[in-house]
Amino acid sequence: MKPPRNSPRSRSRIGRYVIFGLIVAVLAATVALLHWRHGQRAAQTAAEPALTGVASQMRTDASSWTHREKDASEILRDIHERNIAALGLSRNAILVSTQAGEKYYVADRDAAFSNALLLGEIKADGNSSYQIVWLPDAAVHIGMARWADVFDKTRDTLSLLLPLLMIGGLLWFMRREMRGGATLLEKSPALGFVDVIGAGEAKAALADVKAYLSEPAQFVEMGVRAPCGVLMTGGPGVGKTRLAQALAGECGASFISITGSYFSAKYYGVGIQKVKHLFELARRNAPTVIFIDEADGLGKRTDTGGGPAEAESNRIVNQLLAEMDGFESNEGVIVVAATNHPENIDDALRRPGRFDRTVQVRLPDLDDRASILRFYAAKLTAKSNDIDFNQLARLTTGLSPATLSMIVNQAGLVTRKAGDKVVSGEHFIEAIKIARIGDVNGAERALSEEELTRIAVHEAGHGLVAALLGTGVLEEVTILPRGGALGVALITKMQDKHLYRETEIRNEIQVLLGGRNAELLIFNEASSGAAQDLQEASRISLDMVSKYGFNADGDLFSLAALPQQYAGLQLKGAIEHANVLLKDLNDACYALLRANRPVLRAIADQLLESETVPGQTVYRLIKEHAAAASASAARLAQEPEAA
């Protein structure tokens, strides 16, 4: 089918014809100039007197005379003895052909010697025994001058070809830049929505796109407009790219995958041509899904006058806006974009008609994490009966699918390092610790006995407070240094939480303060090991009084409502309220540890003995202490009655 006369494809073809015609015209003009110069030279030669014999040969081809050089005295002697058949005079040599057929030359710089030969005139009754030939254009080269002629010819040729090569190369580079890397996938991905675990909201949004690309007639009959674009947001590794691949695999449409940096170019104006080429390619192969990964690379339009680079970025965004919702029909073209920073995308791109739907791709919940771990673990040689995937899912709260995939692979590396052949649950737990905290770094070898004792008391305080307040499931307490931590109390949640009550947040702060208060209780002074705990507790308490309304004075105003330049002025009062809250929680935490001091001592002693104490042991010690305290209280209550 012949494209419309004014279509972009037709205009592009006309532009190529014009450029090709210009190149042909330049080449034709060059050839004509060379022919004209050759004709002028031939006409000049034809106007000179006709030469015969060796004189004619001397003018047309002087190479036979340039192999032998003689002194000027030799030519004078041959002239005196009338032994000359022909003389050829050029700007830098005199060619001599003798009566005996000998050929040689005499170097004559600037024709000084030949001018001297021509000073005398032949008498009227005399006849010259030889011909004198003026050779202004004869190629007489002696010594290194022979290479100068080759150089001159090469230079002249390059002077003609180099501009053409530069123009052609520039056009080729610009054409390649305009096309960029936007190409159709030759084969659709072998993925479907069933291969993506979780992300229910994103799947529902993309299902509408799939339905439109698969059966557009249904939308037309109902008068429903299909979404023009879908913007997927979410943290790194949550599966945005995998969802786009699943969409391409589901609907069987053409698929173009690019990144936000695709539109940047080294030549001014090429970025706009890339946008046009991208949508022309998509329209020709509709139905098409254009997937733009890291779409925040497009940036926002600004008016700060930042120079040509900023102006070019603005023009690229403007062209993309026009292509997505302009006069051109985008029927059958869907744009799916993914970004970790939606705030960096221009607001005009996010309005309906461009990106009609913004979908938050969330982290997997407890059940989804268990399913993802099972999916990746199926590729390993593992003891399925020995692995509690529900426990592993609790240990991986807040981790993305990409991180879960890395943990499964890390479990295999841990297995190989341990010399085992089959991956077990212990290997998975160790892999999770490496991912969340860090690998064992061996720093305990540099710690003194007093430091190890203090670390054991500190971590025992964290674990004991967490177990007493029920802030989660205490998995284990260890004094083995991991990453940047000298010890760890590993606490997991039974289920993912999105809302926290005030009591739950207060308990979390007490767990953070548990290590420092345990040191105060046992050693009567704290150490610098609680610095990170205090920082996190301070951040949470400041949020409680300045954002969540958990203020003892009943102050409900949120500092988050103020602009940044004004919020700082109000921080002083919020910090004072947060400090009061921290002191109250610190006193409550200290009283809780003092009431369970024997348990704290028992946990610390076991840590010094075995370096790691399971959570079940801590819960057992708490129950034993509670039973002993109840028995002691009952005994004390009976003693007054007996008395």
Image: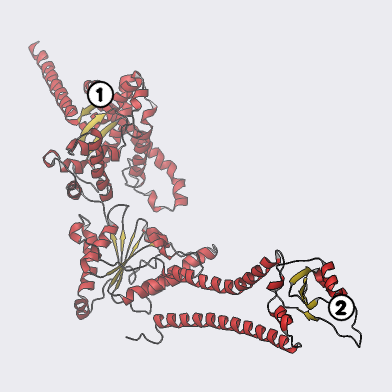
Q: At label 2, which amino acid type do we have?
A: Leu
Left or right: 219 in relation to 574 = left
Residue at 35 percent of width and 45 percent of height: 555
Q: Quadrant of the C terminus?
A: top left
Residue 593: image location, x then y, percent: 26, 26
Q: Nearer the viewer, mark 2 or mark 1?
A: 2
Q: Residue at x 7, y 12 (%)?
A: 642
The residue that disc 1 covers is 607
Quadrant housing residue 307: bottom right
Q: Position of residue 220 (x, y in %)?
A: 22, 79
Where is residue 596, by image quadrant?
A: top left
Closer-to-camera residue (418/300) = 418
Residue that mark 2 sits on: 118
Between 512 and 572, the one lying in front of the other is 512
Q: Is residue 587 visible?
A: no
> Is residue 294 or residue 550 the one in the foreground?
294
Residue 604, position as x, y percentages in the image: 26, 22
How far is the residue under mark 2 from the one under mark 1?
118 Å
In terms of image quadrants, where is residue 407? top left
The extreme left residue here reads 642
Q: Is residue 367 above or below residue 61?
A: above
